[in-house]
Image (tube, grey):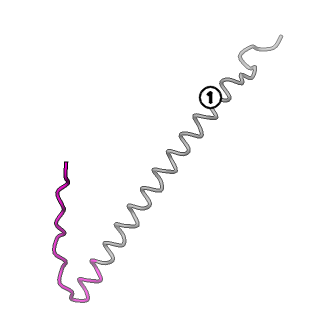
Amino acid sequence: MSNPWMKKNPLMSMWLSAANKAVGSARAQSTAAARRQVGAAQAEATRQIVDFWSGKPPRPPVARRKSRR
């Protein structure tokens, strides 16, 4: 006699495939965002180091615009 728990379930298979696809997409998006942030932080740190050792005066802080509501 075959075990009923070991039979394939097409509905469960489709549901798990869709869930895996969604999780994979979310993971790719978060990984890409993290890499962009790391790259921007590294570029800014490099710029600050080069400016410091080349004797450039520091940049003034950028004033943010107030958003209209």
> Residue 28: horizontal and vertical position, in percent?
52, 50
Q: Nearer the viewer, residue 44 or 64?
A: 64
Left or right of residue 25, residue 10 in this image: right
Q: Which residues are magenta?
A: 48-69
Magenta highlight: main SS: loop
In which image quadrant can residue 12 be found?
top right
In which image quadrant can residue 8 be found?
top right
Q: Residue at x 31, y 78 (%)?
A: 47
The crowding category of the residue bearing disc 1, from other C-alpha atoms within 10 Å (few below 14, some 14 to 19, many at least 20), is few
Q: Could you tell me which secondary element the residue under label 1 belongs to?
A: helix
Image quadrant in which the N terminus is located:
top right
Which residue is situated farthest in the right direction here? 1
Q: Which amino acid type is marked by label 1?
A: Trp
> Residue 34: horizontal and vertical position, in percent?
42, 56
Vertical relation: 2 (above or below) 40: above
| Residue 26 in magenta stretch | no
Left or right of residue 66, residue 34 in this image: right
**Residue underneath mark 1:** 15
In which image quadrant can residue 56 be found?
bottom left
Q: Residue at x 39, y 63 (%)?
A: 38
Left or right of residue 48, residue 21 in this image: right
Q: Residue at x 62, y 31 (%)?
A: 16
> Residue 60: horizontal and vertical position, in percent?
16, 75
Which residue is situated farthest in the front direction here? 69
Which residue is situated farthest in the bottom direction here? 54
> Residue 21: horizontal and vertical position, in percent?
59, 40
